[in-house]
Amino acid sequence: MSSDRVTAAVAAYVAAAAELAELDCGAFTHAELLELLGALEAVAWRLPALEHRIIARLQREASAVELGAKSLKAVLTERLRISGKDAARRLAEAKELGPRQSFSGEALAPQLAQTAAARAAGTIGPEHVEIIRGFADKLPAWVDPITREQAETTLVDVATGLGPDELRKASAKLTTCIDQDGPAPDDRERARTRGVYFGPQGPDGMSRISGWATPELRATMEPVNAKLAAPGMCNPEDEQPCTSGTPSQAQIDADTRNVGQRHHDALIAVGRSALSSGELGQHNGLPVTVIVSTTVQDLEKAAGSGVSAGGTLLPMADLIRMASHAVHYLVVFDKHTNEALYCGRSKRIAPKAHRIVLHSRDRGCTKPGCTVPGYGTQVHHVNGWATGAHTNIDEEVFACGADNRLAEEGWTVTIRNGVVEWIPPPEIDVGQARINYFHHPERLLTPNDDDT
């Protein structure tokens, strides 16, 4: 199919969607409305099949750098204005449901060919696809290709005409039928599954932890918890918490924490000990420690919060308590001017003071769409070190490693009124955002005309 026909088909679809959007639903009966709703859903279910083919080709052929981003995931998040999580899902779906090619260029069917065909026909929806993909991903490695294909056929048949809840039940039952004894201990499977994840901060600042621990991690934490999570140990409610030796009987008797709370406080003690030991060395030019920025106004009234270099919001009470335990880097700036420290240097490596101020000003990678926090960034010289520019704080910005390299591909990075802007090369400029607000959401709530 020629590109002209595709363009015409898309235009026709857009026109039809516009016409449907203006539809007066008052003329339909309730039964007709449900029929219309079902037809619209079927159309919506079919469209991702085309998306899978588009993304699959981009995955095979495209250069993310030439498209103006550090990865194809970043291309999708910036161009489609979707989240990184949604972009990752679409890439993974396209990899399993999109067409493939052999090394010799021969066309191959999708990994989940029957699921892809059902999605293209509009007989199954996104929830069905998610369940079938999850089933296939969790099948043990020893399951042969024929059994896998037969299982996929069964689930696609179940999904056609039934809802996700029934399919989920059938999927769980089919998993049991295939692997009746359950998963055997397998080092590769454990290595693939392991992980500890911190969820987003809630309104109260708390974060949910989830994941799977290997036997090694569990065995390692057992003696740590036996010591540091024992009653009376590392209790933040004590005036002088016991962090070594043996707690007094009074501390043990006064400890009202449950087991989970004691394990939590033991982790803080382990992390605090590691940070204060000095054995972690340096990371991106600074000793490994906690870096927090706040305003002098909030410090004076002991209210508000600081922001860590990892993006964590720290209520002022927690920040003051942390400062009493160890020497961390605290960057204080004026809320009204956000005036940065100027200390020019003729060295290639940005000095320690510069990095601390950049943690305060930028908080993370300044490339729009990037979520890498300050701890994971490098210092980018906007005027180009190779051309003789000095290492001055007003000529430096934070960028993650990939975006730091991308900046050399025709991008213009500027600092205007203390705000970093990334201007793309003309050939890939589609009006995308110039400023990264991810690390500074407060700017979206109290916009400054000079920052746009």
Image (cartoon, rainbow, N blue to C red):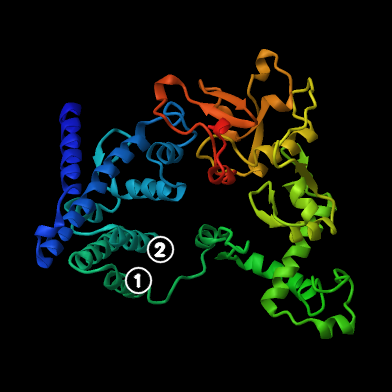
Q: Outermost residue, top direction?
A: 387
Tag 2: Cα neighbours inside 10 Å, few (<14), some, or many (≥20)? few
Q: Where is residue 368 drawn, in percent x and y? A: 52, 36
Residue type beneath disc 1? Thr
> Is residue 323 in sight in this rendering?
yes
**Front one among 373 and 406:** 373
Q: Residue at x 74, y 63 (%)?
A: 268
Would you say the residues marked 1 and 2 are in contact, meaning their CB atoms lie under 8 Å apart? yes
In the rendered image, which quarter contains the N terminus?
Answer: top left
Q: Residue at x 43, y 41 (%)?
A: 77
Label number found at residue 186: none
Alpha-carbon distance for marks 1 and 2? 9 Å
> Is residue 282 in sight in this rendering?
no
**Front one among 443 and 12:** 443
Residue type beneath disc 2? Lys
Q: Residue at x 54, y 46 (%)?
A: 445
Judging from the image, what secondary structure is the residue with disc 2 in?
A: helix
**Front one among 200 and 195:** 200
Reply above or below: 290 against 75.
Answer: below
Q: Left or right: where does residue 430 sit relative to residue 328? A: left
Q: Which residue is mark 2?
A: 138
Q: Quadrant of residue 357?
A: top right
Label number found at residue 175: 1
Q: Earlier in the sequence, mark 1 or mark 2?
A: 2
Q: Left or right: where does residue 34 sit relative to residue 353? A: left
Q: Where is residue 380 drawn, in percent x and y? A: 64, 28
Reply above or below: 22 against 156.
Answer: above
Judging from the image, what secondary structure is the residue with disc 1 in?
A: helix
Tag 1: Cα neighbours inside 10 Å, few (<14), some, or many (≥20)? some
